[in-house]
Image: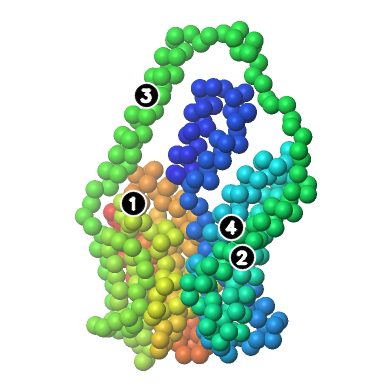
C-alpha cells in the first residue's frame, strides 16, 4: 500500500496541476508507472502448489510413477522439488506488463484489451506448468543428465520467450489499426476560464504545508505513545502434567526475523514431547515485522528441512475456537507437525491481512503495534493423527498461560 501510494502521487500531481483533460489524454503512461512497484510475493506459495499439482498429474498421465510429499516428489530416475523459482511468478509479472502494453498499443475497444490482458495472465501460468513438466521429463529421459543444472533456467526462459511470441502473434489477428482522433484540449475554454484568486492559491498552499507538516508529527506521536522496556516472555509452567525440559526437542527453528523477544521451550509428558516457539514484535519496521513474506517456517533453499504441505484448521479451547495453520515439515531423520497462529491486539488470528488491520487499529488508538506469532510442534512417524492429539492436549492445558504471558508483555494491557 505504501509503495503504490508513493507511485500514485505522480499521476495525482499531474492531475492537480494540469486538470482532467490532460490526465485523460495521457492516462495510460501515467498509470503504467504502477508496474514499477514490486508486487506478487504473496502469490508464490499458491503458484508453487499448482505447479506441483499439474506436474504430478502430467507425470502420472504419461505413465511415470510418482510419490509426492507436498512440493517434493520422487520418480524412478530421481528426486525433484518445486522451489520459488519454479512458481512462475516472474513469467506472470513479465507477461502481465507486456500484455498491458501490447493491448493498449494494438487494440482500441475495451473488450479486446481486457481479453488480451486476461490471456496474458492465464497463458504464463499454464506455460509454467508445461515448462515444469517438460523439465522433469527431460531429466527423466536423459537419466538426470540434462535439465538439472543451469540449463534448467535456460530452457525455461527460452520456452517463455517462444510462448510470448506465439501469444503476440495470435493477438495480432484481432488488431485494430484505425487511428482514433486524439483527444484535444478545449483551448478556448481553457483560456477563458476564470483564473483562481490569490486567496484560493494561498489557502491551498497553506493546507498542503499543514498536511505535510502534520503527518510526521502524528507519526512521531504514535511511535512515542508507548515507551516501555523490551517485552519479556514467560514460558508456561507445569500445567496438565507437562514438564519443561532443559534441552530442545529438535534443531529446527522457524525463520522469523528480528523479534524483540523470543521464547523456545520444550515439554514432556508420558514420553511425548512438544515444543513451543513465540516471536514477539514491538515498534515494527522494515526487517523487524511480524507480517511479511520473508517470515516463513522453512526457506526453499534449506537443505535440512522442507515444508511438505499446509492447511487451515480450527481448534476448540477454553478460550473459544481458534483458527490456526497446520504444516508438516520433513527433516533428514524426523518429521514435525506444526500449528501456528498470530496474536495481535489481544486477539488470536490466522489471516495475515486481518492481522495487519488489527495492528493499524491498535497503533492509531495509541496501544502500540505489539504482535506475536505462536507455534507449537511435535514429531510424528508415518501418520500425524497421534501428533494432532498431543498438540491438542498441550494447548488445552497451556493456552491460558500462553495468553497471560503475551498479555503481560503488552504494556497497554496491564
Q: Which sits in the foreground, 234 or 261?
A: 261
- Distance from disc 2 to disc 3, alpha carbons, whole Å, reads 53 Å
Foreground disc of the pair 2, 4: 2
- Distance from disc 3 to disc 1, alpha carbons, whole Å, reads 27 Å
Foreground disc of the pair 1, 2: 2
Helix, strand or loop under label 4 = helix
Instruction: Give the residue at x 57% y 36%.
Output: 29
Look at the numbered discs 2 and 4 and tell me whether their residues touch, using CB distance below 8 Å.
no
From what the image shows, is residue 314 above or below residue 335? Answer: above
Helix, strand or loop under label 3 = helix
From what the image shows, is residue 351 above or below residue 150? Answer: above
Residue 17 in sight in this render: yes
Instruction: Give the residue at x 51% y 11%.
Output: 196
Foreground disc of the pair 4, 1: 4
**Dot 4 corresponds to which residue?**
92
Of label 2 and label 3, which has the lower sequence position? 2
**Dot 1 corresponds to which residue?**
285
Of label 3 and label 4, which has the lower sequence position? 4
Of label 2 and label 4, which has the lower sequence position? 4
Q: Position of residue 138 (x, y in %)?
A: 60, 79
**Dot 3 corresponds to which residue?**
209
Q: Position of residue 35 (x, y in %)?
A: 53, 46
Of label 1 and label 2, which has the lower sequence position? 2
- Distance from disc 2 to disc 4, alpha carbons, whole Å, reads 14 Å
Residue 395 in sight in this render: no
Q: Position of residue 286 (x, y in %)?
A: 35, 52
Using the image, tell me which numbered label, if any, was put on residue 159: 2
Helix, strand or loop under label 1 = loop
Q: Which quarter of the figure has residue 213?
A: top left
- Distance from disc 3 to disc 4, alpha carbons, whole Å, reads 41 Å
Amino acid at each position: 500500500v505504501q509503495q503504490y501510494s508513493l507511485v500514485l502521487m505522480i499521476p495525482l500531481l499531474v492531475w492537480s496541476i494540469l486538470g482532467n483533460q490532460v490526465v485523460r489524454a495521457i492516462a495510460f503512461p501515467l498509470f503504467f508507472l504502477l508496474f514499477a512497484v514490486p508486487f506478487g510475493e504473496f502469490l508464490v506459495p499458491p503458484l508453487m502448489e499448482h505447479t506441483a499439482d499439474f506436474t504430478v498429474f502430467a507425470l502420472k498421465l504419461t505413465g511415470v510413477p510418482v510419490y509426492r510429499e507436498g512440493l517434493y516428489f520422487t520418480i524412478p530416475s530421481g528426486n525433484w522439488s518445486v522451489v520459488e523459482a519454479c512458481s512462475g511468478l516472474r513469467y506472470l509479472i513479465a507477461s502481465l506488463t507486456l500484455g498491458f502494453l501490447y493491448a493498449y498499443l494494438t487494440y482500441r475497444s475495451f473488450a479486446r484489451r481486457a481479453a488480451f490482458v486476461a490471456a496474458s495472465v492465464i497463458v504464463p501460468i499454464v506455460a509454467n506448468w508445461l515448462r515444469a513438466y517438460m523439465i522433469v521429463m527431460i531429466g527423466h529421459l536423459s537419466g538426470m543428465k540434462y535439465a538439472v543444472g543451469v540449463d534448467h533456467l535456460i530452457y525455461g526462459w527460452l520456452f517463455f520467450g517462444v510462448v510470448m511470441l506465439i501469444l503476440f502473434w495470435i493477438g495480432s489477428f484481432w488488431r485494430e489499426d484505425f487511428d482514433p482522433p486524439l483527444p484535444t484540449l478545449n483551448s478556448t475554454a481553457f483560456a477563458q476560464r476564470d483564473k483562481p484568486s490569490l486567496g484560493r492559491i494561498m489557502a491551498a498552499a497553506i493546507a498542503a504545508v499543514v498536511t505535510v507538516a502534520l503527518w510526521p508529527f502524528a507519526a512521531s506521536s504514535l511511535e512515542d505513545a508507548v515507551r516501555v522496556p523490551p517485552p519479556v516472555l514467560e514460558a508456561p509452567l507445569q500445567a496438565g502434567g507437562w514438564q519443561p525440559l532443559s534441552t530442545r526437542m529438535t534443531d529446527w527453528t522457524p525463520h522469523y526475523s528480528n523479534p524483540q523477544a523470543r521464547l523456545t521451550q520444550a515439554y514432556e509428558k508420558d514420553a511425548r514431547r512438544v515444543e513451543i516457539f513465540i516471536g514477539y514484535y514491538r515498534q515494527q519496521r522494515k526487517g523487524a515485522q511480524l507480517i511479511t513474506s520473508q517470515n516463513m517456517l522453512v526457506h526453499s533453499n534449506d537443505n535440512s528441512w522442507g515444508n511438505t504441505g499446509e492447511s487451515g484448521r480450527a481448534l476448540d479451547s477454553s478460550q473459544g475456537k481458534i483458527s490456526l495453520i497446520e504444516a508438516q515439515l520433513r527433516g533428514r531423520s524426523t518429521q514435525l507437525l506444526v500449528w501456528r497462529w498470530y496474536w495481535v491486539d489481544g486477539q488470536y488470528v490466522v489471516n495475515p491481512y486481518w492481522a495487519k488491520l488489527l495492528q493499524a487499529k491498535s497503533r492509531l488508538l495509541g496501544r502500540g503495534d505489539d504482535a506475536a506469532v505462536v507455534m507449537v510442534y511435535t514429531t510424528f512417524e508415518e501418520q500425524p493423527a497421534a501428533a494432532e492429539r498431543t498438540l491438542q492436549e498441550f494447548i488445552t492445558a497451556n493456552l491460558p498461560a500462553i495468553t497471560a504471558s503475551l498479555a503481560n508483555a503488552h504494556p497497554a494491557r496491564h
